[in-house]
Amino acid sequence: MSILPRMRILHASDLHLDSPLRSVALRDPILGERLRTASRDVLRQIVDIAIEKEVDALVLAGDVFDNGVPDVAARTVLTVALSRLGAAGIPAILIRGNHDGLLDHGRYGPLGDNVMLLDHNRPTVDVGGVSYHGLSHGGQPETRSFLPRYPAPVPGRINVGVMHCSPDGTSGHDPYAPCSVSELLGHGYDYWALGHIHKRQEWRGDGVLAVMAGIPQGRHIRETEGGSVTLVEIDGHGARAEAIPVELVAFREIEVPMPAEEAQDAQADRVREALATARVGDGPSVLRVTLSGPGAQVYSARSGEAARFLGVLAEDLEGLHLDRVIIKPGQAPAAPALVGDLAAAMREEALSPGFRDEAERLLTDLRDVLPAELREVLDPGELDDLIEEGLAAVAARLALAEGT
């Protein structure tokens, strides 16, 4: 265990500067523009925190950019931010992730004397009392663990590993550079600064801490976790980490129960309170709302009715934006025998493996013909919700047609 004086590090990852967000802009141009600049504004905020906290280094654990060819404006945002760090005497240590693995950091000139890129040519740099070790992604997907290629810890120094990877037990992201958490914790470093998974997580071992910093600023409704950077203090007693919120636009998913036969004014009060409670911070909040229960049945038969209902309720809540409204009425109300039989037959078919496989194939085909920045609109993770919502809507239309 190192006995050197305390070192303070600010750890961030997955900035995805200027990630395309046109799907959001199509629904809400004002919010789309706010999101377009949010990643830049968050980077400036990260630099402010680093200077205010007088950290010894800023560590960026991959995917600073969303691709390997950022435009000159995005590159300028980064260089200006890092030059502010340099003026404050704070070095920046970074690696390339799977998104910016092909990035040529010298394309528009050097990033600055205080900026150190770790890769296979330079896997270790010594800054103050800390040895930083890291490897960058290249042009091909990394299907093997990086860990065997990481240098051994330097004796007598604090050792920090920087890696863009998929620790075991994580899901929802491409499994690039998979690694075992137990092997990470046993490698001999004092701290692991990790990137790639957009949800913040911590793993602690004997005298070592590994942190997946998470995405500082979500980009769409599926990125509801993260929204922070990590302040780390390391000394002879180990590493301690504190999450510092930085997100400027929050994405959240909420579910509002709708009891049967509840008066509309009571429904409105219930939903309005849920919307107000879901607001995060002072900035814009983007909500995906699920109305669940038998009381939601009235909305499922008329396309757009629920969205208009919630839109009116949200008008008085400044900064609140609705991404989508989902209806989950549960058990449908009583219907004539024929309608009930049809609904039961549809549900039985929808629960069969063949139906789901075909629905998944159709969803994939639709996604494949969309531009990359629009594919989030048809998220495969929502297939079950889409099927359930469709069943409820068709059953309700059948019931209305029979006069129930």
Image (cartoon, rainbow, N blue to C red):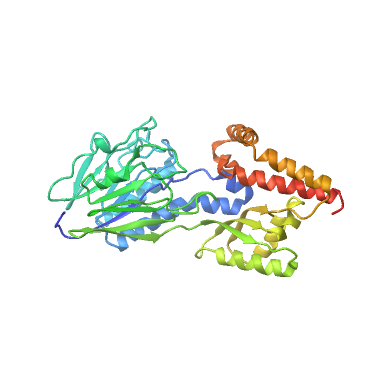
| Residue 375 image position (x, y, % from top left) | 57, 39
| Residue 399 image position (x, y, % from top left) | 81, 50
Q: Nearer the viewer, residue 7 or 43?
A: 7
Give the residue drawn at x 68%, y 48%. 389
Q: Nearer the viewer, residue 183 or 223?
A: 183
The residue furthest left is: 156
Q: Nearer the viewer, residue 273 or 139?
A: 273
Residue 39 to residue 104: above or below: below
Residue 382 to residue 297: above or below: above
Is residue 44 shown left or right of residue 262?
left
Is residue 279 shown left or right of residue 302?
left
- Number of disc labels: 0
Give the residue drawn at x 68%, y 60%. 310
Residue 116 to residue 335: above or below: above
Is residue 311 shown left or right of residue 6?
right
Q: Is residue 112 visible?
A: no
Give the residue drawn at x 29%, y 45%. 182
The residue furthest top is: 140
Q: Quadrant of residue 70?
A: top left
